[in-house]
Amino acid sequence: RPINLDERLQHEAQVADRQSATMTERALNTATRGINSLRSPWFSRYLKTFTKRVIWDGLPFHLLAGLGLGAVATYFSFNMELGSVSVEGEGVVEVSRFVLPTFFEQMLSGFGVVMYRALIPLFTCICLAARAGTAVTAYLSEMRDEGKRQWDAMESFGVPPAWFFIPQLLIVFSIGAAILSYFAFWAASLGSLLVAMATNPLCTFYTWRDTYWANLKPSVMVWFEGSSLFLVKTMSAGVCIALISAYYGTRKRKSSLDTMTNLSRANVLSVLITLAVFFVLLVIESGV
């Protein structure tokens, strides 16, 4: 006999309930296997591998980049041309001749805050996305190669690949972004000191020391005011970079062109998300 509307709706509801129960069971089984895989020796091995490649191998690069950025930013901030004005009896006089001697200490103290809270962590996280994020995306994409079938091999042994790699990446990128930003700031501070003393006769080491750190309010010279949001910004950006790199690295690919596409998309998206995270948090910070 034909099925009436009520019977059809009841049947569809039963099918939906069965599918929901099956999906829930599969999700729980996957989560259980994923949690069990965290106890595997391979978890610690890949954690060490990612830590080495992201943090330790990247530390010299970020130190040099921070040193260069601090030097360049200081030079152009305190040696920029502000134009000229006509002064009676003196002729045409450069504005910087009045501004720099008068407001040098105030400018330098504000410069230290900008370097610590915005410029250096943002620059470091963008470099982290470009260097380590791209490398991780390529590494995972290579494992996803259908010819090598490494991904299928892990699944056949009951190891969910996403669960296996994402926790390590989240740990390494979040902590690594904070560590690399912190040390890059110290390198940038050294670059700022060297350039300020070399190019400005008003600046001595003691002047720089007493003004550059003034608004940062250091505590035992290792913890600065605003460090909590510094950690939030850098670690949030690190988490976003890790997730984006894992997503594009674990996508199926059929050719090397797909790999290049995934790498470029992961790189661009990581940079854009990092900029968005910093913009939102800096706006929040400015209103605190």
Image (spheres, helix red, strand yellow):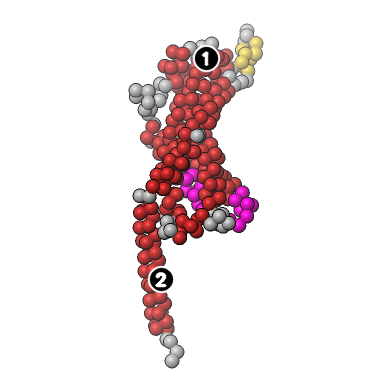
Q: Which mark is residue 129?
A: none
Q: Nearer the viewer, mark 1 or mark 2?
A: 2
Whether residue 276 can be seen here: no
Q: Which residues are magenta?
A: 240-261
What residue is drawn where x is 37% and y is 23%? 221
- Element assignment for label 1: helix
Above or below for 13 versus 37? below
Name the residue nearer the viewer: 156 or 18. Answer: 156
The quarter of the picture where the N terminus appears is bottom left
Residue highlighted by disc 2: 19
Label pair 1/2, CB-CB below 8 angstroms: no
Q: What amino acid is at disc 1?
A: Met
Q: Main secondary structure of the magenta part?
A: helix
The quarter of the picture where the C terminus appears is top left
**Residue 183 place in picture, x, y as percent:** 45, 29
What residue is drawn where x is 40% and y is 44%? 44
Snapshot quadrant of residue 209: top left
User: Magenta span has 252?
Assistant: yes
Q: What amino acid is at disc 2?
A: Gln
Residue highlighted by disc 1: 197
Name the residue nearer the viewer: 248 or 117. Answer: 248
What residue is drawn where x is 52% and y is 22%? 191
Name the residue nearer the viewer: 192 or 23. Answer: 23
Above or below for 136 versus 258? above
Residue 89 in the figure: left or right of residue 274: right
What residue is drawn where x is 39% and y is 31%? 226
- Element assignment for label 2: helix
Residue 79 in the figure: left or right of residue 34: right
**Residue 49 place in picture, x, y as percent:** 46, 41
Residue extending farthest bottom:
1
Residue extending farthest top:
89
- The residues bearing labels 1 and 2 have C-alpha atoms spaced at a distance of 70 Å
